[in-house]
Amino acid sequence: MDEKKLQSNPFMTNMKFLEQTKDETEFERILKILTVPSKSGIYISRYDIRDMGKAVGVQVTIRERKEMLKDLFIYAKQMDNLKGFIDIIISFVDYRISQYRELQEKYPKSAVLMEKWIKKAEALKQFLENMKKEVDIYKNI
């Protein structure tokens, strides 16, 4: 950054930061939660997303995970099957939780670590259940 410009306006660094950050929509936040394991407690691979698409009845091309999920949400909404798609994601979360529990049983020393991931995954499951309820609420409006 130009030193003279910075001296004339000390808030310029903040302005640069504001220019780089963009406002996220609620939908983008949902996609971020689903695609960031540290937030969701699970990792959803591209092939997992492809399989979810097959379960909904659409062939999804393999590319960035967030874009694939975005397409599936849009498709499910267009086909009036958003609740069904959310149910598919919930069943996937349940599958991952069961895998974590198996690992806890096989490797007892990892129980503390796995419990953190299970809690995050269960929080994601609750978040998705609430999303499913909201689909019903907004459908009637």
Image: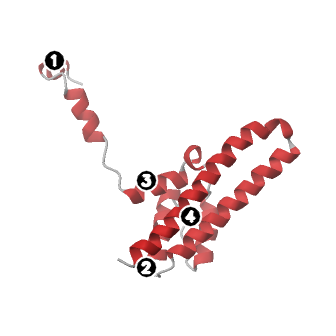
Horizontal and vertical percent position of residue 44: 61, 56
Q: Quadrant location of the C terminus?
A: bottom left
Q: Is label 3 in a helix, a strand or a loop?
A: helix
Of labels 1 and 3, earlier in sequence is 1
Of labels 3 and 4, earlier in sequence is 3
Of labels 1 and 4, earlier in sequence is 1
Q: Is label 2 in a helix, a strand or a loop?
A: helix
| Residues at marks 1 and 3 touching, judged by CB atoms closer than 8 Å | no
Mark 4 surroundings: few (<14), some (14-19) or many (≥20) residues within 10 A: some
The image shows residue 97, relative to residue 18, as above or below, that is below
Observer able to see residue 64 = no
Of labels 1 and 2, earlier in sequence is 1
Disc 1 vs disc 3: which is toward the camera?
3
Residue with the mark numbered 1:
7
Give the alpha-carbon distance from disc 1 to disc 2, as whole Å: 53 Å
Mark 3 surroundings: few (<14), some (14-19) or many (≥20) residues within 10 A: few
Residue with the mark numbered 2:
78
Residue drawn 14% across and 23% down? 9
Residue drawn 52% across and 60% down? 63
Residue with the mark numbered 3:
29
Q: How is the image coloured?
A: secondary structure
Seen from the viewer's position, the closer of residues 6 and 96 is: 96
Of labels 2 and 4, earlier in sequence is 2
